[in-house]
């Protein structure tokens, strides 16, 4: 998964991008980067790791100008290499160009083969590089038209930011898989670039994967970028167009379940609200027989399970307790003694809070189960801390299908729900009961959280739920060709 | 503040100490260290920063042996220097000796002057070094007796671990300011050092500031070390003695309020339980007039305010909501744009979750107020996110006095409650109402959380609450002499 | 300047390349890199700085296979960036390809504009990247033919190594500006890749900028690659061809004067021998009147001036003394006190050895003068150490013209000899006398050092001496277009 | 071995110390450190590695004041640890004190035991720490008198610098084992600390192990510190005294042979001059039969063998040639292929220059032979490069005894000359002939190099030559007690 951020018209554009990326850090911790422009040149810094450690003050000073885009990246594919960090930046016929991408193109291999046959060279295995080649080889006159030309040739999920010396162009794919939103940042003195006019108070424009990036920098959320919309943003303002054929909306449901920050609002729907409602519906669908406030507690798997557990506890009129305490200091390269320690791996992150678990019936709430190994350890750990019963409740349907649209899920073989029934999973977890929220329940939670008139007025769900249903809205090449990988 | 950990009889003692320190990381992030012994030599590694980054696998391999002690440290005094990292290790007349210290000696300056006058040299400004000199200059025959001799000359707060080639000696000061507890770690095969006998199943002994350190390594909590107790731990077992004159117990109340992990149990009392009960009592003492579930939400300042907020919300029958979302990625060396951003500092750590705040009366619950600046920003941020009213509730009394027993509180001049009434503070915070829990209420919460018979059976509270009351149980030299500091 | 190295058929190809680059380190210290192949994939590692610090054992383990090429780079142009490090590696229509380049293309801008117009994108400002695009866009069938096709479109100086999964292709430009040589490395057991046959004893082939790279790895020098020659090297052996139109040989004269290691032999001529003979001729052309062994010493500027000083002293029958001592510990980021220190900059590297200088007439021998500032400091430093007279002798002609064929010389404006007569330079240096070796003298020294029949049999010098004479054998675009640089 | 440097009265004292240490870097590369004082506090920075990398500009800014001492250290004993880095700095009864030490105390163990018995604690195994304890436990009134008191209790080799808030005290042991010299540094404006008077032009005083440290900073050499002399240096000037009983001078002969920089002058004798004269005497003692300029070359092992080779060649009237080329880029953690390479280890540092070796009789000159392994490889490498004969000449006597006075020589078991005759060593080296300079010859070379009146006027050589003769001028405890080492 990735997060993207762009700013136009701020005298400290790179600093603003740095803060925006910081607020989007949950969308990717593998690498990050910023490209800025001072109207004459592009300047780039990319590094492995998190924003806070990847950029020194000196690095930011070397990114002058009032236009910038940034990227945070996480990917399990192909190993971790600096060369995969974005934004990418190139020179081509029309000048310099940078790009930042959240998503995944499903026809990448075919596009790449076509490009190679006409003489393009590739320095990464990233589908993002292919977009740059399509732009470079387009015969359209303007950068904007070349981008349209290029994107008409690709399929799949993309929220994209392009940057030349003075402009940021933001595009969201026609089905709207990945979020993207637009904001405005008032400037205290002087206009964007310091040229305020009486007609236009000084302000910068910002685009980001999630509105939490606007909160940190004090920007105002204007609106979501619409599926299929292209915004051309420069100092004079924002130009919107819709250059692609319309397609049904298929925004990602898993953003609401897990990926987005709870304080974000995507396509008009609050993430925290969805999760709380999902928790309430989860208890309605899967109550715990005879649960009483005197002997039963609702315990979230922190932090992602907290909102659903709050919703479930409130709906069930059961006490909500922090029965699992999360460590703030989880190290990466941890050393385990040879002498095996029970529940070791999970305890590094979570410790049972015995005082609220002892002799209780425990309803433990999590957002999803991927491989099942962590959940199994949690169940055992809760029991060893004194829980009388352990009832696992998951605030989304079984995750049974890989995502081909930008989320780094494991292969089907690794997804426990791809090959096991709920009862089989319950036995594996050694839980007393196990309940998943139904897809209808989850879609209902999103619908309920939508403002009045509500979501997709056409009655269609308007979401991609392929990871739960296997219903993939865009076909993809299943057999990946034998890659000639360049590592390093 | 600091955390200490010791292990005797485990074939991978340094690895166990590493994990124990990891679980105590919340007690100090400035520096850390481990000293191990293989019965022939002591081996040491100390470094700045957190455990996870300070120790590489190679560092741990260079710490052989089945005995180890470790230390995590935080101190605002005298800057951050590696030379202040503990455990300290020296050679003296009886051989090699290491020490790890949690606490603060109140008669350090007098002791140091006496030692210097007889020819001792000091490499740090740390009171811990003075203890080593007192041991070295004692004329008692054994290490144990020299330690007793030395500690009889010092006053104040100390939980101490000493280590020679084969033994760990653990001491808690007679008033029991700082916590210390004893645990046992079963070994799967072979005894401590591999010499299991039929009478004694193989096990290692562990000591730690808090029992959460035992949870991570799969050790069993045995009991708290008693105030004034000395434990001599070697492969043959644990010898207890009480070599000091008895004093009234004065264990630190602030550990329950803020410092200890919520899943810890100190002197028989569960921390999470105290915090929840404090939250309930807080609402009883300071209700919010006319609060109804339909228009009022209880919002913790995460993570430290969560248990009190849960307790308050349950007692008040009001909804508990995560109205402030905490970032997991707070960087150290953060760059702020010159262009000022509203609420910037606090937003890096906390972002308001507007969906649960808008048009609500918000009861925001925190554990304490130090300078007041952060709380003031939070109140404003909650209002700007749509809160109709903001009622601040603090689950401890006003913090009006500095701690001289091991917690790094600011000077009185910086403590807002040292010079301002609650009403003045409320106005500064711009809160609608402000309520602190009374000292009686807090002591009552601890008493209620104590198991049946309960706490200090003599009716005395048994706690140090000098930071709230100014009632210092041990005198201290107020005027610090002009220090001849060696920096570096 | 740069150095290149390639190996085919060695089971530890990356390790061999690492050692080869180490021996070529004097040709570039800014960045370095290696690409290896295990017949299935290419693997790359590039880093800033020197070989010894840029590659860890782990880095080398991640470069498997029996084919590898490597590169060391120094460039003053465009700042120091990792993205400029070589070898470059790409994927294109025919598969994976890596390239390492020593030299400079003179028609780069024209080629690049042509490539951009047909849709190529550029990630660096390096002319090397243009060669890759020419190959990718060639319509020839084989990699070899595409390389020929590409190189026929470029002009200037290039010694190039290409690598695909199983082959290294080495090319030296038709005028032979930069050196390149071929060697063979016997393998103790098993053949290249372990497939020895009775007809062919096991061996690997190596190519390098200078034969010193062979010395370190125990390889045998076979021969220089000829100007205009292309070698296709795989496990089966070496195929030579000459696909380019013949041009007059113009190998770089400055390699003999300064750039190459003294223990190298380029195009059959020993570098140390040239330098010694240049020193002897220098004294013949510019004797010091009345120099006697009793009052005159010959002092080199170490290390580059040593061979010429030895030759001069022997020819003049004057004592050779180390009158300047070179520090082995010259740091990069040196701190100078504000309080100015005389001769500070040059003293960091060189200190006068007063005992051999005092009251002497000193003949100080250096290879060249660039800006003159260092020489001026040296002269003053020698005088302040007691030298009675200082006679500067330079073992090459005045350096008056920039190099456009791969050596990073300053612009003409910075070259003191571009705008000043020898007498003016002498006055600037404050030397008693100054003598440069004539171009005829230098060419004569090379000729004398050549084996029997000797050098260019056609009587032509066969060397490029543009930096001395301004006689540029290949035209170049003087006005560089306004670059749209991407920094980072 | 170690190097020490001190400065008093320079407004940028730490910067000056940094440069001084840089010039003394050849005396120790393991660790380095500087302590400065601004008259109120001491400030320290110590780090592993070389000066240029161990100090950042920020590190130096944190070392304010006009007094500073510094230290560079190399030691094979006890591993490399930061805690062994000097200067040490402590607080004791009289205030703050720092110390830097070059040398080795021979009665350290006895002193330490006495100190431990009275209650001193030790944080290192360094004899330097014992000196600090002796000062702290002395009952003399002033720091100066305590230092005298302390040093009267120790034996062995020491050149020492002490620093308190305003003063540097320099002491050289009564036998003068290690060098130490005094210089003066004129300040361009204002006096030391800015308080110039008409009577006293502004200047700073500097002390250093070798005068090359003065050259780099532009200071003037005043004189050597005499054996047994103590200098008390503050802003008002230099006070000399001789508080110790006189002993015969025994300055280290090996400094002239190898350790000191050739451009240094120790106790009035130029190092380069000694080496050249040693080379001449070496040929006189061990000529090569029938050597003629037409077929014989003199080749130094660079850099340490260069002056002796120059002297030998001149005396023998044979050509001096750089037949071995030294690499400037020798890396520390080098990777060798499993596939063994002939002469690999030595080739990393030295490569034969075949053009001057082929078919020649080669006289190769080095300063000493320690284990013999490197010399053996050199002989073989010279032969494989074409040398017809190889005659090894060593410009000092066989090194057969370890040094107990501060040089890190191997144990006797490792010294090839401790157990083998010259003929046996020759056979091991596979040299045609081998000749060592006699002790008389070496002492004669020193004597000849001394200025007119000459050296030890009493006819005694005045040098320690225990490493050659086994004649140890100070007894030492041969059996080192079982150390209770603290590593880390």
Image: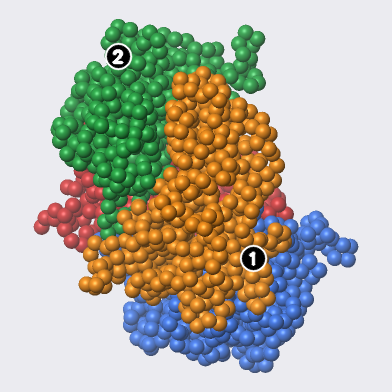
Chain colours: A red, B blue, C green, D orange
What residue sits 31% from the left and 38% below the top?
C295
Label 2 crowd bin: few (<14), some (14–19), many (20+), radius 10 Å: some
Q: What's the distance in space between the residues labelled 1 and 2, CA to CA?
A: 71 Å
Q: Secondary structure at mark 2?
A: loop
Q: Nearer the viewer, residue C379 or A438?
A: C379
Label 1 crowd bin: few (<14), some (14–19), many (20+), radius 10 Å: some
Q: Note whether C153 is above or below B391 in the view shown.
A: above
Chain ID, mark 1: D
Q: Note whether B232 is above or below D183 in the view shown.
A: below
Q: Nearer the viewer, residue A75 or C78?
A: C78
Q: Nearer the viewer, residue C148 or B280?
A: C148
Q: Quadrant of the C terminus of chain C?
A: top left
Q: Is residue B281 left or right of residue B370?
A: right
| Residue D435 position in % (x across, y down) | 59, 35
Point out the residue furthest to the left here.
A198
| Residue D66 position in % (x across, y down) | 35, 68
What residue sits 44% from the left and 62% below the top?
D225
**Residue on which the image places disc 2:** C462
**Residue on which the image places disc 1:** D107
Chain ID, mark 2: C
């Amino acid at each position: 998964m990735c997060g993207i951020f762009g700013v136009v018209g701020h005298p400290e554009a790179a600093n603003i991008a740095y803060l925006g990326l910081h607020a989007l850090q949950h969308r990717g911790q593998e690498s990050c980067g910023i490209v800025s422009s001072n109207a004459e040149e592009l300047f780039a810094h990319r590094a492995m790791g998190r924003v806070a450690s990847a950029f020194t003050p000196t690095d930011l000073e070397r990114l002058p100008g009032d236009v910038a885009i940034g990227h945070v990246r996480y990917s399990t594919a192909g190993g971790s290499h600096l060369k995969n960090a974005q934004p990418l930046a190139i020179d081509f016929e029309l000048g310099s160009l940078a790009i930042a991408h959240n998503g995944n193109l499903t026809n990448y291999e075919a596009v790449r083969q076509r490009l190679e046959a006409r003489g393009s060279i590739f320095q990464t295995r990233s589908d993002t590089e292919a977009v740059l080649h399509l732009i470079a080889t387009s015969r359209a006159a303007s950068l904007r038209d070349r981008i349209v030309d290029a994107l008409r040739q690709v399929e799949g999920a993309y929220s994209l930011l392009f940057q030349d010396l003075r402009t940021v162009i933001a595009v969201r794919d026609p089905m709207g898989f990945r979020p993207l939103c637009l904001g405005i940042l008032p400037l205290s003195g002087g206009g964007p670039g310091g040229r305020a006019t009486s007609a236009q108070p000084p302000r910068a424009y910002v685009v980001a994967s999630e509105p939490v990036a606007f909160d940190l920098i004090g920007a105002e959320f204007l609106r979501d970028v619409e599926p299929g919309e292209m915004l051309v943003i420069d100092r004079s303002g924002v130009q919107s167009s819709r250059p692609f054929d319309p397609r049904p909306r298929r925004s990602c449901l898993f953003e609401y379940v897990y990926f987005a920050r709870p304080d974000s609002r995507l396509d008009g729907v609050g993430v925290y609200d969805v999760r709380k409602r999902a928790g309430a519906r989860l208890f309605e669908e899967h109550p715990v027989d005879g649960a009483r406030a005197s002997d039963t507690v609702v315990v979230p798997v922190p932090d992602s399970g907290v909102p659903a557990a709050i919703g479930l506890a409130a709906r069930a009129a059961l006490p909500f307790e922090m029965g699992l305490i999360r460590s703030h200091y989880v190290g990466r390269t941890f050393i385990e003694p040879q002498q095996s320690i029970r529940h070791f791996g999970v305890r590094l992150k979570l410790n049972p809070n015995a005082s609220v678990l002892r002799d209780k019936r425990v309803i433990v709430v999590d957002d999803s189960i991927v491989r099942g190994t962590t959940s199994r350890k949690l169940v055992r750990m809760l029991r060893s801390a004194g829980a009388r019963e352990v009832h696992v409740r998951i605030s989304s349907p079984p995750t049974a299908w890989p995502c081909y649209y930008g989320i780094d899920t494991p292969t089907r073989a690794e997804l426990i729900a791809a090959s096991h029934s709920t009862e089989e999973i319950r036995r594996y977890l050694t839980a007393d009961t196990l309940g998943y929220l139904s897809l209808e329940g989850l879609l209902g939670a999103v619908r309920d959280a939508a403002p009045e008139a509500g979501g997709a007025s056409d009655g269609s769900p308007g979401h991609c739920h392929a990871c739960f249903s296997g219903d993939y809205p865009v076909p993809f090449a299943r057999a990946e060709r034998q890659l000639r990988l360049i590592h390093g």
